[in-house]
Image (cartoon, rainbow, N blue to C red):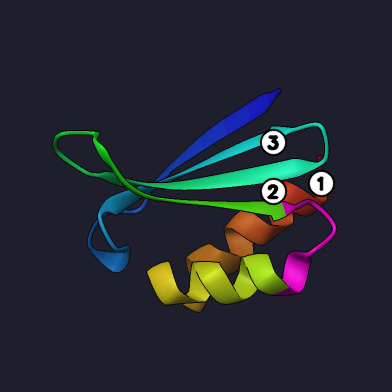
Amino acid sequence: MKTKTFKIGEYCLGGIIKVIIKNNKVNILCLDYYTKKEFHNENFNINDIYSIDNFLNELTSCYYSDKIINYIKNI
């Protein structure tokens, strides 16, 4: 299992995106920047990059979405 937290701040809904990769599944969590409480969670297949990218673009800018996609691809 691999986990990475992206503390983006004001350019992201909630401020933090946490990515958990386990057994070809990607779990993307949106966390509140100050309380660290989860308020949105979505699961994807690791090969479904198009859907992951669309979801991330709803949460944050294309710059940070691209950084997260590159992290997922390099696992």
Task: Compare marks 2 and 3 and give the one earlier in the sequence.
Answer: 3
Q: Identify the mark at residue 21; answer none if there is no mark.
A: 3
Q: Position of residue 20 (x, y in %)?
A: 60, 35
Answer above or below: position of 35 versus 27: above
Mark toward the viewer: 1 or 3: 3
Magenta residue span = 45-50
Q: Amino acid at mark 1?
A: Asn
Q: Nearest the camera: 58 or 65?
A: 58
Whole-Å distance between the Cαs marked 1 and 3? Answer: 12 Å
Residue for point 52% across, 67% down: 56
Q: Amino acid at mark 2?
A: Tyr
Task: Compare marks 1 and 3 and give the one earlier in the sequence.
Answer: 3
Residue 65 visible here:
yes
Answer above or below: position of 50 versus 75: below
What residue is pinned by disc 2?
71
Whole-Å distance between the Cαs marked 2 and 3? Answer: 10 Å
Q: Nearest the camera: 66 or 53?
A: 53
> Are the residues at dot 1 and dot 2 in contact (C-beta closer than 8 Å)?
yes
Q: Identify the mark at residue 1; answer none if there is no mark.
A: none
Q: Amino acid at mark 3?
A: Ile
The answer to whether residue 18 is left or right of residue 22 is left
> Are the residues at dot 1 and dot 3 in contact (C-beta closer than 8 Å)?
no
The quarter of the displayed image where residue 52 is located: bottom right
- Quick one: SS at disc 1? loop
Residue 60 visible here:
no
Task: Inspect the magenta stretch and tell me whether residue 47 lies in it.
Answer: yes
Q: Position of residue 10 (x, y in %)?
A: 22, 62
What residue is pinned by disc 1?
74
Task: Inspect the magenta stretch and tell me whether residue 51 lies in it.
Answer: no
Q: Nearest the camera: 11 or 57?
A: 57
